[in-house]
Image (spheres, rainbow, N blue to C red):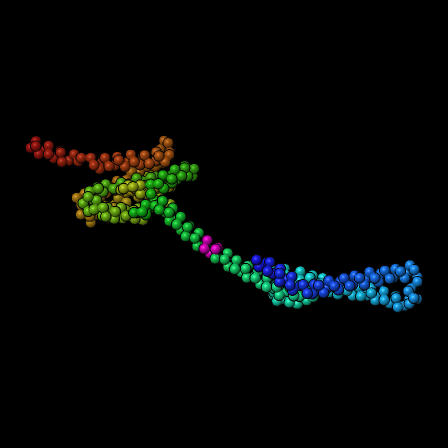
């Protein structure tokens, strides 16, 4: 049996006694009213009172009417007014505008129901408070999980675009960013230089001092690049010992100056390394405005060609020892 059914049974038991008594009173009032009207009609139509007792019979009829009127007024005071008062107070109590205990001022035939109604309102208020508390806990949990999820997403986004060793952007982000930067510089009619950097003699360093020493050197080069570039410049590690630096709004002369500064910094950095051939930077440079077809692919390709041209010059055999040998032979 549900709680609502149990409450209905309680209400029925409470109202059974007063309800039967009031029904008996209403039936008696209706009977007196009908008798009084019938009697008055007979007196008015027949003009012949029973045994000539006019005064007594009229008084009895009027008394019956008065009794009927009093029954109506009593019924209104006992039922209608309390019900109207209760209908006005219950919504205010549900909204919390008035205390639930104020319902106790309702009297009349529904007075036995007031404690039950108050109990139901208190239960309802407790349920609302419990639901509000639960909703607050759920919102708090959702907010915490959302914050954790956003931090996780930010971390994954950072990992997806950054090189774990040097902290520079990775090759994947270069492939996404370079076309956008190229298009933006063309629209704004500004220069765009690209430096392609390769570390020469890096493999002998790994073979001699170990991969840990090679990683430390790459980290240090990444830090030097970050400290040397401007705020608008973007640096990437493309993998292995290759780096790319984008220089928007930078002229060729300024790009060459930066390349020379980076080369000098790395030369000073590797002086303490005990290797036969110390690592050194080879840097190729390309400029967007000098390209016949200014695209991201051509910008990279031109810098790559310039890089290998520099490497070819650097690794070309020195003719001076051969000339000295020929002079010695002739002598």
For the question of whether residue 228 can be seen, the reply is no
Left or right? Give the position of 69 relative to 166: right
- Which quadrant does the C terminus fall into? top left
Residue 178 appears in which quarter of the rendering? top left
Farthest residue to the front: give it: 51
Q: Read off the magenta span.
A: 138-142
**Count of numbered circles on the image:** 0
Identify the residue at horizontal 50%, vertical 57% (top origin): 134
Horizontal and vertical percent position of residue 235: 33, 44
Horizontal and vertical percent position of residue 43: 90, 62
Above or below 31: residue 217? above
Identify the residue at horizontal 35%, vertical 41% (top origin): 172
Q: Main secondary structure of the magenta part?
A: helix
Above or below 138: residue 49? below
Identify the residue at horizontal 21%, vertical 42% (top origin): 203
Residue 201 appears in which quarter of the rendering? top left
Residue 249 appears in which quarter of the rendering? top left
For the question of whether residue 188 can be seen, the reply is yes
Residue 243 inside the magenta-drawn segment: no
Horizontal and vertical percent position of residue 116: 61, 64
Residue 141 inside the magenta-drawn segment: yes
Identify the residue at horizontal 36%, vertical 44% (top origin): 160
Q: Nearer the viewer, residue 34 or 253?
A: 34
Above or below 152: residue 182? above
- Which quadrant does the N terminus fall into? bottom right
């Amino acid at each position: 049996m549900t709680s609502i059914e149990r409450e209905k049974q309680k209400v029925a038991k409470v109202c059974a006694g007063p309800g039967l008594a009031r029904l008996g009173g209403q039936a008696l009032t209706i009977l007196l009213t009908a008798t009084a009207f019938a009697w008055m009609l007979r007196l008015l139509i027949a003009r012949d009172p029973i045994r000539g007792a006019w005064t007594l019979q009229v008084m009895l009829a009027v008394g019956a009417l008065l009794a009927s009127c009093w029954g109506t007024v009593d019924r209104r005071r006992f039922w209608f007014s309390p019900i109207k008062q209760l209908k006005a107070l219950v919504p205010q109590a549900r909204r919390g505008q008035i205390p639930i205990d104020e319902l106790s001022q309702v009297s009349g035939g529904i007075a036995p129901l007031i404690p039950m109604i108050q109990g139901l309102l208190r239960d309802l208020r407790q349920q609302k408070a419990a639901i509000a508390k639960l909703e607050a806990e759920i919102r708090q949990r959702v907010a915490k999980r959302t914050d954790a999820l956003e931090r996780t997403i930010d971390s994954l986004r950072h990992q997806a675009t950054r090189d774990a060793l040097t902290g520079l952007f990775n090759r994947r982000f270069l492939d996404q960013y370079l076309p956008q930067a190229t298009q933006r510089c063309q629209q704004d009619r500004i220069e765009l230089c690209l430096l392609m950097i390769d570390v020469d003699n890096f493999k002998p360093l790994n073979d001699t001092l170990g991969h840990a020493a090679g990683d430390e050197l790459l980290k240090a080069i990444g830090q030097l690049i970050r400290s040397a570039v401007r705020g608008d410049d973007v640096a990437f590690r493309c993998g292995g010992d290759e780096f790319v630096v984008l220089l928007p709004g930078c002229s060729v002369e300024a790009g060459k100056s930066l390349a020379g500064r980076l080369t000098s910094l790395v030369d000073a950095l590797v002086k303490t390394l005990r290797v036969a051939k110390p690592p050194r930077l080879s840097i190729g440079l390309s400029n967007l405005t000098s390209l016949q077809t200014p695209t991201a692919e051509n910008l990279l390709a031109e810098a790559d060609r310039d890089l290998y041209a520099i490497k070819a010059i650097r690794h070309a055999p020195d003719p001076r020892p051969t000339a000295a040998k020929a002079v010695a032979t002739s002598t």
